[in-house]
Image: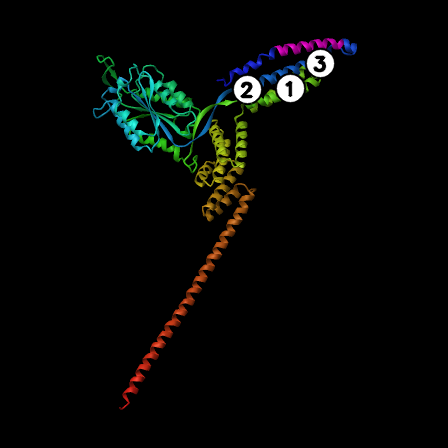
Amino acid sequence: MIRCAYPGAFLLLVPLVPALVFLLARVKKLCASLGVLYGESFDGTSVRRVRRALAAKILLRGMTWTLLVLACAGVSWGKKVVPVQKNGDAVCFVFDISYSMNARDAGGGMTRLEAARQYARALLEAMRAPSVSVVLAKGDGVLAVPLTEDLASVHALLDALSPGLMTATGSRLGRGIAAAVSAFPPQSAQAAHVWVFTDGDETDGGLQAALDDAVRYGIPVALIGFGSEQGAEVTAGDGKTTVHTALRAQALRSCADRANESMAFPRRTRGATVQYLPATAQGSAHRLLRALSANTTHSSANGADGTSFAYETQDVDRRALFLLLALACFAVSFVAGEADISARTLRTSAVLAVCCLAPFVSSCNARGNAAIARGAWAWYQRKYRQATAIFLQTETEARAAQDDTLAQYAAFALAATYLAQEEYAAASARLADIAPDAPASLRSAALYNEGVIAHQQGETDRAIGLFKQAILADPANTDAKINLELCQTETTMRQAQSAETEMRQAGEGTDDSKLANGIFTLIKENEQNQWKNVQSNKKDDGGIDY
């Protein structure tokens, strides 16, 4: 679908029509006077060629102006997946408070609304202090609690949940989801989530369109079903009529599947953007909470500060394409105005120009290569966050287009970005995505980077093995050869130092033993001499007569 950001720019095309008419009339008048000026030497063929050249120049200038106006108008078409950096989570609870939620088939004699209340309380207690908002959906969607971190107001509203909170009739889940999407600030740094507590019994059929809009904004939605599929009797809003209502599990599941099929994300990037979970299913609450933690702990896409990248679809801006075509038309207008070109040559040149421009306009591979180049330039400028976003977007688009080669190059570039930031775990996870059948140079470079990571982590022997594998994959990898020699030299020196240390310790142990033995011998001799002196003194004293 073609979109235009600034439609008012098309007013600049209004002066173009009279200007072209005026200039073409002047060309015709000029060519008519050439025969009079040059006489018979300037025949009709020459006049036609001059007229054709000048007309081509004027039309190319007019086309240049048109393309510039289109660029100013912001014309775009197509969709692309854009990674958006997020920090933390924001959850909007959407409660269906229609009268069908009063049916007592939620287990334990509870109504569906009571079960939804208890389920929401359990989630709030297990959540790690995110921002929470609450939307009530009945005949309309109303934001009851704006986005806040004060959960006391949320608990107070949970106690008061009742169909009597809203006077509107009917059950319009789509409006509730639309109100939830609008509750998130447009430029919020938090990853948004919408959890809908409902039995799926809607009256206007607007759920599918609301889910498609949420997918387009990159907001995951969880439809949590309450009640039983067998159903139960419930009193309608008039207080008299009794109707049979049941959990519309199949309808909710079908809406989720259709929304996921229409999304532009590859499923393996973020999982299903819309999911249906029966409230009674084992581990359903754990799956919801795990979706929150996935946005803050995913090792391969997050920085050390807990940031993450969510994905949303955006229109593809064609401004650069229009500017490029405008520059080409302006350059060709000079050649067309001065050259003596036949009509056949003009047609051939037009066909060749279209064929040359077609790959740049439609080729995903060309756009991917350009994106890799932009990311590499940001990497060399040490703008690692910008480079990470570009490489993530390129990999996502390549996976969607099933271009495995481009996806692996993007993964390698992403690993190099993480490695430059000393995020070794994230870099290793990305390098593991390089397939064994990848190009030899890419596989060798990946093994080389794994060897660098191993060496940085003190695993020299493993680094030596990885460098050898890199050389086997690509014998021209000089960096791997140099680092292999350095690691082997380091290992040899470490072994020599270890042997020298052991010998020194052994020698020091021998000297200490000799010294200890010498001291012990000296002490023993001194004790013996003292004992002999005592014996001799006693004999002398005994021989003296007073």
Q: Earlier in the sequence, mark 2 or mark 3?
A: 3
Visible residue check, residue 230:
no
Residue 397 shown in magenta: no
Q: For this rendering, which residue is in front, 184 or 51?
A: 184
Residue most toward the front?
Answer: 546
Identify the secondary structure beneath mark 1. Answer: helix
Residue type (three-letter) at the residue carrying disc 1: Ser
The numbered mark, 2 or 1, whose residue comes first in the sequence reads 2
The magenta segment: 18-35
Q: Mark 3 = which residue? A: 50
Inspect the image, locate mark 2, and give the three-letter code of the amino acid beneath it.
Cys
In the image, taking residue 250 as reference, residue 42 lies left or right, namely right
Q: Is residue 33 above or below residue 372?
A: above
Is 29 part of what is drawn in magenta?
A: yes
CA distance for labels 2 and 3: 33 Å
Chain-order first, disc 3 or disc 1: 3
Q: How is the image coloured?
A: rainbow
Closer to the observer: label 2 or label 1?
Answer: 2
Camera-side residue: 147 or 456? 147
Query: What residue is shown with label 1?
Result: 349
| Residue identified by numbered label 2 | 72
Magenta span main SS: helix
